[in-house]
Image: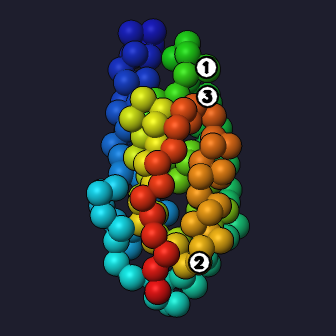
Amino acid sequence: MKKFVPYLLSSVLLLGTVACSGAKTSADAPNTTSGSGGDLTATDKTQNAQDATNPVREKQIESDKRAIEQRNTAAGSPGELADNDISSLVRNELEKSIPGSQLLVESKDGAVTVSGKVATDAELKKIEPTVKTVKGVKGVTVKATVGK
């Protein structure tokens, strides 16, 4: 059994890395942080908000956070977060804080870049302070814009 543990842990880490790459707050968010994505329609905003505030999604966000903490503790590095973990945690916080948005989150060495669309100037101003609340974030670049 002991010789299978490293393979099991490696499989879980690989799955987590693949699942979290290119973290988005909606399916319509841009695919890279170099662009701002398409226009944000009222229907998009409503659907994204419903998805983000769904009780099942809220439980999934909390479960994701616990899984990251447990995985890092089991790996012997409870205080360290990989860039994919930071991106995932930031995306989840943005989804809860700005539920109607279409945002893409990328992290490199703790420097987070957020691009995409939000509906209002107030939501755009919420991005940076929300991102800074996430453990492991060392800096924030906001490339998001206000969409229609």
Task: Using the rendered view, name the quadrant where residue 52 is placed.
Answer: bottom right
Residue drawn 43% across the image and 23% down it: 9
State the mark number for residue 78.
1
- The first of marks 1 and 3 along the sequence is 3
Query: Mark 2 or 3, which is nearer the eye?
Result: 2
Residue ID for mark 3: 70
Question: What secondary structure is found at the residue carrying circle 1?
Answer: loop
Q: Position of residue 16 (x, y in %)?
A: 42, 39
Residue 1 visible in image: yes
Residue drawn 56% across the image and 45% down it: 89
Q: Residues within 10 Å of mark 1 (few under 14, many from 20)?
A: few
Q: Position of residue 144 (x, y in %)?
A: 45, 64
State which quarter of the image contains the N terminus: top left
Q: Amino acid at mark 1?
A: Pro
Q: CA distance from mark 1 to mark 2?
A: 37 Å
Question: What secondary structure is found at the residue carrying circle 2?
Answer: loop
Q: CA distance from mark 1 to mark 3?
A: 8 Å
Task: Using the rendered view, name the quadrant where residue 30 is placed.
Answer: bottom left
Residue ID for mark 2: 120
Question: What secondary structure is found at the residue carrying circle 3?
Answer: helix
**Most foreground residue, 121 or 20:** 121
Q: Amino acid at mark 2?
A: Thr
Query: Mark 1 or 3, which is nearer the eye?
Result: 1
Answer left or right for 5 relative to 97: left
